[in-house]
Structure formats: C-alpha cells, structure tokens
Amino acid sequence: MKVIELNNICKAFGDNKANHNVCFNLKKGEIHALLGENGAGKSTLMNILYGLYSCDSGDIVINGDTVEVENPSKAIEHGVGMVHQHFMLVPQLSVTQNIFLGMKETGLFLKMDELKKKVAELNESFGFNVDPSAVIWQLPVGVQQKVEILKALMRDAKILILDEPTAVLTPHEVKELFGSIKKLTKSGYSIILITHKMEEVLDYCDRVTIMREGQVVDTLLVSEADHDILAKAMVGRDVCLDRIIEPQESGEVLLKLEGVTVLNDKKLPAVKNLSLEVARGEILGIAGVDGNGQLELGEAIVGLRKIEEGTMNLIGQNTTHAKPRTMMDLGMAHIPDDRHKKGLVLDFSIKENLILGSQRDEIYHNGLLMNYAKVKEEAERMVEEFDVRPRNIELTGAMLSGGNQQKVILAREVSRNPEVLIALQPTRGLDIGAIEFVRGKIIEERKNNKAVLLVSTDLDEILTLSDRIAIMYKGEIIGIVPPETPVEEIGLLMGGIKNKKPKGGEPDESQV
Amino acid sequence: MEVLQLTNFLAAAVRMAAPLLLASLGLVISERAGIINIGVEGIMLMAAFAGYAGSKLAGGYWYGLMVAILVSIAIISVFAITTIKYKSQQVIVGAALNMFCAGLSSFLYRLIFYNTGRFDEGIAAASFPRISIPVLSKIPILGPVLFNHNVLVYFSFVMVAVLWIVINKTSLGLKIIAAGEHPKAADSLGINVLHVRYLATIFSGIMIGIAGAYLSIAQASSFGEGMTAGRGFIAMAVVILGKWSPIGALLGALFFGAATALQLLFQITGVEVPRNIIMMIPYIATVVAVLIVSRNKVGAPSALGVPYEKS
C-alpha cells in the first residue's frame, strides 16, 4: 500500500530547476532512502511534501487522496512529520514545551504536568528515554534529535521525513537512531530518509530512490543494490576513491617544525614539543582522533595561532612568529577546517571570495581602485577549471553547496601557485563526487612537486593520500609510519598505544 | 517626620515607576517575539500629546486615554508593517519614528492649542484622580506607598501578573517565545510567525499608549514638548535590566522610579549640589545598571531585531 505518491513534481528557483518531473512513492512500513549528492534536489522535494515550498506543478497524493499542502500545518494534518537537518527546537524551552509548541490540542492554558506525562508515555512506548523537563540547550544532539522525532509522533505523524539525520551524530548515536526507526516501522510508521551516505542506505533501508541534478535517476530495492551501483547513479559516472598515488621521489624540505608547543583556547597545551618535516613532492598525512591537537597544529602552521615554543621554518625562512600574510607571500596555501568561518566570507560573491587574499596583487588593481574586469575574468576562469556549480560568479558564498564552497576555496588557494599546501579536513561533510574532486586536486599538487600537509580525522582519507602518516595523540606525534602499515597498527597508535619496534623510515620524533 | 519623608519618597518612586513599567511590559512582549522598537520614545511622546488633547478637547481623561491608545496603535502599526511585512531594519524605522513623533507632537500642540483660545480657561486637562483603596490604603507606610494611586498604577501592577501568566503558562506565551528565539522552528510547526509578531507589537503599542497618557494626564495634567525626556529609552533599559521578564521589568522600573524620586527629593530638600547634576541621576543609573547587567551574557531573544523571512 502506497502512503505517499509524488507525481511529476517540478520546482524551479529562478533558472535553477531544483526538481524536474520528479516521481516518488512510499510504501507503508518501509524505510525509503532518498539518496543524492548535495544540491540534487532531495531536500527541495521533501520541503514540498512538507509544505515549506510550493511546487510549480505536479500532484501530491497522501493515502490515496490528492491533496494541497500549502504549509506545514497541512502536512501535519495529513500525518506527515519532518525532522530537519538543522533542528527546529527552541533552545530555551523544555522538551515538553518544544513538543507541544503550536499544538492546538493544548488549549490556551498549559497543564504542564499532564503534558509531561504524555511525553513520558510516548517515550516509553518507543524506548526513547528523554527527560520531559530537560531544557533543550543542555541536551546532547543525539537526544535533541529524539525530541524532534517525538515532536512528530505527538502530532500523530505516521509518515516521517528525516533530513540527513546522522550528520551530527556519533557512530553510537547513529546505531541507536536506526534502532528506534526500525521499531517505528514495525508499528506501522513509514520513513523517508534523506541522505548522501551510501552505507546508511545499504545497512538500514528497504528501498532507495536516487536523485541527481533535480531528477530521479532510479528507484530500486536495496537488496538489489550495492556500493558501486549507488555511487554511479548518484554521481552519474564511475567514482574512484582508491589510492592512486604513484611513487615519487621527494625533494628538499619546505616546511619544518622543531619542538613546537601551541596552546588551545583554554590556554592548555594542545601541541607539545612537536617536530615534523614536509618535503617537496610528498603528502604528509596527520592522522588521529579528533581533538588530539591536530586543529591547533594546523592553525599554528598557517599563523592563526601563536607558537609558544619551538621554531617553524618555511622554505628556508624562520616563520615562527610570522603573520599569515607573510606565509602566504612565501608560498603557503591553506584549506581551513571550517569553510564557513575561516574559508569564505559567506556574504561575498564567489568572484570576491576567489580573489580574497590576492586583492593586493598588481593584476587586480590599478592604483587605488580594484580592476573588477580582471577579477571577473580570472574568477570565470577558476570557476570553469574547478567546476564550481552553478557557474554564476555573482552568487554569494552562502548560496553554494558545501562541495562547491570547498571548490571555491581550493580554486583560490591553488591558483596562487603555492609551494606548500596545508589542507585541514579538506573533505569533511562533502559528498562523494566532491570528495573525489578535492582529493584529485591535492594529488595534483603533489605531482607538481609541492609539499602537502594533510590533516584529517578520516583514516581512509589519510591512507588514500599520504606518502607518510604521522599519528597524533594528545598533542604529540606518537609515530610516523608508511601507508602500507596495517590499519590495526595505526588504529592502536591513534589510541595512544605505541608499538615497541618503530616502523618506517623516520625516527620516532615524539620525545617527552 | 522621618517616616513621612520615607513614605513620600517610596510613593513617589512608585508613581515614577508606573509609566516605565507600562511601557517596558509592552516592550517585554514585543521583544520576546523578536521585535526591537527604539521608536518607543517617540510613540510615547505622541501618546502623551494625544492623551492630553483627548482629555482637554473631549473633556474627560478616559477619552484622553482612548485617544492615546489609538494614536499609539496607529503609529506602531506603521512600524509593524514596515518591519514585519517589508523587513525594514527595525532600529532605523524606530529612529525615524522618534524624530517624526518629536516633530509632529510639537507641531500639533502648537497648531491646536496656541492662540486658539483653548488655553483661555487654563492649560490643565482633566486627569486621572487618585483612588485610595479602602482598608488597604490605611496600612501604615505600605498603604500610602502602594494603595493610594491612580487607576493606571494599579493596572500596571495587574499587568505584571497577567503577562507573567501569559508568558509562562499559556500556549500563546510559547508561541511568542518561539517567534523570538527560533522563528523558523515556530514556522515549521505551523505557527504564523508574522501574526505573532504583529500581535505582540500591537499589544506593546497599547501599553506604550497608556504609558504616554500616564505622563500627561495622570502624573501631570498638561503636555510639554519633549515631555518623555528619554523615558522610552529608559523603558528599553528596564527590559534589559529585567531580563525580558515581567517581574524583572517591575523591579527594574521600581529601581529607575526610585532614582527619579531621589532626584526629586534632592531638589526639594535642597542638597548643595548643582541642580543639573541631580537631574542626571536617573540617566546615570540607567547607564550604570545596563552596563553591569550586560557584563554577563544577558540572554536577549536570539532573533531579536532579525526580520523573519520564509526561505
């Protein structure tokens, strides 16, 4: 039995066809994944179903009736609930207040005790275990998500749309979440899961609809799908994330740290007496569990954080206390870990973001005024070369998807033709096509005989890209190993357990 | 003698606090819904004029109060439509309203009352009389301080309780808080954020209107150009001091009322300090109090001053 049918949905934002003749259906009791890269039109489609957008044409059929969903209240009336990627919870209100916010059934005067009891009952029937009196901002995100689900359940939603629900969860929370979802489907609820993670689809879903560029590519049973089929359908071509680095001689050392100590925001040492070297033509990968000082190390190298002790050498110059601008002029490029806060000025156009930092280059100004004709010309060239979509250089940074934002940053940094590239978490949160692109560019820099320092908490990424792998633990490099090292051994090092006989060509540099 | 002076001082503090309380209660509601209205100074001034004109021309303070409320609603509707519907910057529209109202109130005052013969029988208009509450007003100290005032003072006290209940105990209160803290969340639950904000703003208009009328036809019985003298801004400070809660607003208003009463007391008793310095007391108190409170993160509504646009 089909609880939802979306027929020939079309929706355009200006020239951009976000949804074009999209058809989708949901059966009772299934978990149906809506898979696609960022910007493929998944969220648009679901926002239409939930009444946040109105479609330009097409029908929405819920439980056999063609309906108009003008606003979320209508969707709720038809039993459709949505858990948004960015939680729609008022942080200052309690769990119970959030759940009953806007519900007509409460009447004007709130009987809090009664409402709390209702929340507790619902809690119990699905094993959610959320404290009804807790205030939202004090709860971890995993619990906040449960509150979102409870909110939909309290409104008698039988169909739940979950928009990228695992983006902010720890692996343990992800498991728990899908456990709850399974329980819901057994009680007759139907779930739509918006995601770009193939593992979630293969591990937990019944059917999958793949979208690309605003259109449905295919709908299949998960039992008939595998990793390659999904990846190809999503990206539209074969995707390769395997290690494709060819052996190559490394040259002279371009970046050298000796005995460097750096403090974190709480003024405690985050990097302790650390030394490393990166040479021309190699990628040094820094692996480690998040929070072991990698971020502070990266910031110190690019000049955003003070080096308290030790020295740093960049291309033969002592840059221990140099400003970011000096480093940039010497030939350092930087892909920051946080695109929104450090990588882009979100309110600037793509064009402006692309020359950020190079604005004082002679080619971009004539005396006092900016030469915007030249800026535009260069920006257009970069957008083309780095495949930034859409190609419109007048859009603001905020209007791009994560992958395209990262491409803008890459384009800017690589176009400066640096000698040393510092890449911090370069693919975090990106979809598979964008990951492939970004990694490809990093490999290209290595091929062009640049020195690359890669910091990533994604061990696969480190293994795929690095010539040498340095493992950081509690602010120190606990070992440097070649990429052929068994994963188990690296895993142990990441957990702080040191091998007795150090492997690899480098001496152990972590002296306490 | 000492006791009498204290009683008089406290009673004056309550009288001076009332207009601040009325306006700040209105502002608590509109700011909780996400609207920051610095035009309160000007609107209050226009309401003070309208209250006076209504009372003088129609011959009764209730008429005055009604006219003040209507004028205040009319002006704040302009503010509401431009900022809520057309998403103009709230602070800019508010600042513009202040200048507009200052000019308009003076202009109308002169146009209607100068050389028109309306001052022939004096400039005083009918104003709200004091009503001593039986029994209660006979309690020593407390009686004269709390229970010997005009009806608007009592109304302001009642409103503290009413608004506390609305904010903390009703679904409407939840909607107002949601509209000011996370309007998108409210919208996703089918709450019409713009309607909530209109409602809150219009309500604040009513309260500001009453506050204005209080100045001209309860505290006094005449209008003076620029007679609000910054009380609208002080009411905004009271909201911050009271951390956006009605009870906080009550305490904040009493604090500033006391500062003003102290200034009056010093003027009467003739402390040997230049008069200008004594008159600065309430304003200095404002600056100092707000500075102290805002040293810790004060918890203003997250979406305060941010127009809500559906994506």
Image (cartoon, coloured by chain):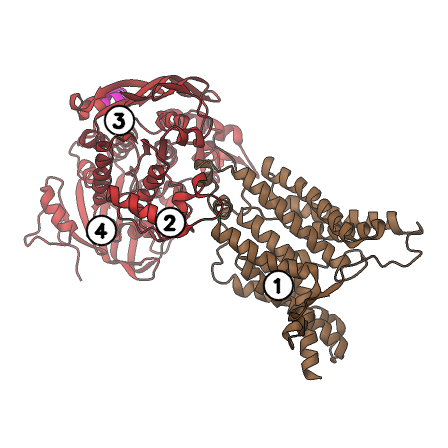
Mark 2–mark 3 Cα distance, whole angstroms, equals: 35 Å
Q: CA distance from mark 1 to mark 3?
A: 57 Å
Residue annotated with mark 1: B253
Would you place residue B204 above or below residue A184 in this image? below
Residue B172 visible, this angle: yes
The residue lying toward the viewer, choosing from A75 and A472, is: A75
Q: Does residue A380 appear left or right of residue B109 in this picture?
A: left
Q: Amino acid at mark 4?
A: Leu
User: x, y (%) of residue A418?
Assistant: 34, 39
Number of residues whose C-alpha sits closer than 10 Å to that of mark 1, classed few (under 14), some (14–19) or many (20 or more):
many
In front here: A225 or A187?
Answer: A187
Residue that mark 3 sits on = A32
Task: Estimate the spatial distance between the alpha carbons at disc 2 and disc 4, rounded to whole Å.
Answer: 62 Å
Dots 1 and 2 on the same chain: no
Which chain is in red here?
A
Report helix, strand or loop for mark 1: helix
- What's the chain of the residue with tag 1? B
Q: Main secondary structure of the magenta part?
A: helix
Question: For the magenta stretch, what is the residue range?
Answer: A232-237
